Image: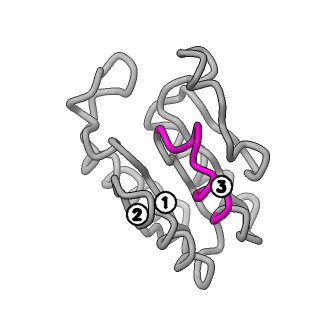
């Protein structure tokens, strides 16, 4: 089963951002783990990361045709991008929202998620392991 893993703005800078908040892995290392975990679960992951909102929306639209489940971490777009929210609203498959840090315990503006009511599950504050939990959830759900 193919699943899309869509990472958003500034996640390409993992490893350079505050490791106490985001962990010490680079984005490349995180993707390597995601592919490994997906394979162990019998899933096929397709990972993408972009700093361009329109590209993120395009990947959502493309995944409509093939993804059986979706893991999203839009980064800061989580808090205000209604364009991404509208793109995610089109999915008829499970969508899991993942955040490395616990956004509910950070700055007030980070506590808002314009996508939370659309997703099947939210996983926040579990670092890289949140992605594994998301893949496990999709495996169980699918």
Left or right, residue 42 beside residue 35 = right
Which element type, helix, strand or loop, lies under badge 2? strand
Q: Tags 2 and 1 in contact by the CB under 8 Å rule?
A: yes
Name the residue rendered at 57%, 42% in the picture: 78
Comes first in the chain, label 2 or label 3:
2
Label 2 sits on residue: 47
Task: Report the disc number at residue 85.
Answer: 3
Name the residue rendered at 68%, 61% in the picture: 86
Q: Residues within 10 Å of mark 3 (few under 14, many from 20)?
A: many
Task: Report the disc number at residue 104.
Answer: none
Name the residue rendered at 54%, 16% in the picture: 106
Which element type, helix, strand or loop, lies under badge 1? strand
Residue range (magenta): 76-87
Distance from Cα at disc 3 to Cα at disc 1: 16 Å
Relative image position of residue 84 (x, y in whole percent)? 58, 57
Which element type, helix, strand or loop, lies under badge 3? helix
Distance from Cα at disc 2 to Cα at disc 3: 19 Å
Label 1 sits on residue: 5
Q: Does residue 125 show up magenta in the picture?
A: no
Left or right, residue 17 beside residue 101 = left
């Amino acid at each position: 089963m193919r699943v899309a893993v869509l990472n958003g703005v500034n996640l390409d800078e993992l490893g350079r951002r505050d490791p106490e908040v985001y962990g010490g892995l680079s984005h490349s290392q995180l993707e390597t783990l995601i592919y490994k975990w997906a394979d162990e679960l019998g899933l096929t992951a397709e990972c993408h990361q972009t700093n361009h909102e329109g590209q993120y929306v395009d990947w959502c639209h493309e995944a409509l045709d093939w993804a059986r489940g979706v893991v999203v971490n839009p980064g800061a777009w989580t808090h205000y991008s209604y364009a991404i929210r509208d793109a995610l609203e089109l999915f008829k498959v499970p969508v899991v929202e993942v955040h490395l840090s616990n956004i509910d315990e950070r700055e007030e503006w980070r506590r808002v998620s314009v996508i939370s009511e659309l997703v099947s599950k939210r996983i926040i504050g579990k670092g890289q392991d949140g992605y594994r939990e998301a893949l496990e959830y999709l495996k169980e759900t699918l």
